[in-house]
Amino acid sequence: MFLDDANRRTIRAVRRRDRLWAGTLLAVIFSVGLVAGAWLPRGSFSFWADDKGRAEQDLLVEASRAQDGAVRQPADVLYVIDGDTFEARVHLWQGLQITTRVRLRGIDAPELKANCYEEERMARASKRALTDLLAEGGVTIFNVGPDKYNGRVVADAATRRTPNVSAALIAAGHGRPYGGGHRAGWC
């Protein structure tokens, strides 16, 4: 069977329409996926897991407030995230423990996601210094408060030999004092 020009044009038009429809459908599916991904809690596909973490941080903050922040909570450091944040298992009382990220109060350390090479170099040195300080053992946190980011608390920390980890890092040049608000750049 031979196709004349009119039939060829019709077949091409149908194929073009099908490709356009398929492309539009893919774009819609991609957009819906982006919106759904942005709507889900970060790092979790479960809405309840995020609520559980928030409840644990609230429990730690309330326990600290009930004791006027003076009581030191023993903590097992799991790992250091950057120059002013670490993850720890905090022992509250009678076998009750929570795992949370602890941001050190009163210090701003350079960020590992740096804007320049010098900041990245300082951030690695700051993280290494915090790791060394926490390796002294006997880590405790106190004066615990909520942080603006869900999943972590702000607290003072001490080790067996260092009464204030933040002050030690600042004195060694691995950070600068920070009281909240806008932070200056490192570059």
Image (cartoon, rainbow, N blue to C red):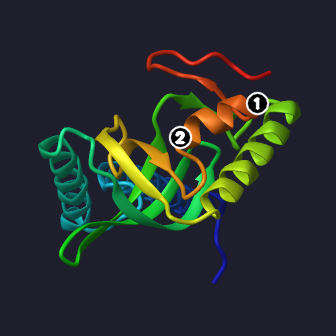
Percent across and percent down for residue 29 are 39, 58
- In front of the other: 35 or 66: 66
Quarter of the image with the N terminus is: bottom right
In this rendering, which labeled residue sits more in front, label 2 or label 1?
Answer: 2
Percent across and percent down for residue 78 are 52, 69
The numbered mark, 2 or 1, whose residue comes first in the sequence reads 2
Quarter of the image with the C terminus is: top right
Percent across and percent down for residue 181 are 45, 16
Residue that carries the numbered disc 2 in the rendered image: 164
The residue that appears at 70% across and 44% down in the rendered structure is: 112
Q: Quadrant of residue 108?
A: top right
In the rendered structure, find residue 187 and report the number of the disc placed on it. none
- In front of the other: 34 or 147: 147
Extreme residue in the front direction: 161
The residue that appears at 17% across and 41% down in the rendered structure is: 65
The residue that appears at 27% across and 49% down in the rendered structure is: 71
Q: Quadrant of residue 36?
A: bottom left
Extreme residue in the bottom direction: 1
Q: Quadrant of residue 110?
A: top right
Left or right, 150 with respect to 13, comes to left
Q: Are marks 2 and 1 in contact (CB under 8 Å)?
A: no
For the residue marked with disc 2, what is the amino acid? Asn
Residue that carries the numbered disc 1 in the rendered image: 173
Q: Is residue 3 above or below residue 149?
A: below
- Mark 2 surroundings within 10 Å by alpha-carbon count, few (fewer than 14), some (14 through 19), many (20 or more): some
Looking at the rendered structure, the secondary structure element under dot 2 is: loop
Q: Is residue 37 above or below residue 126?
A: below
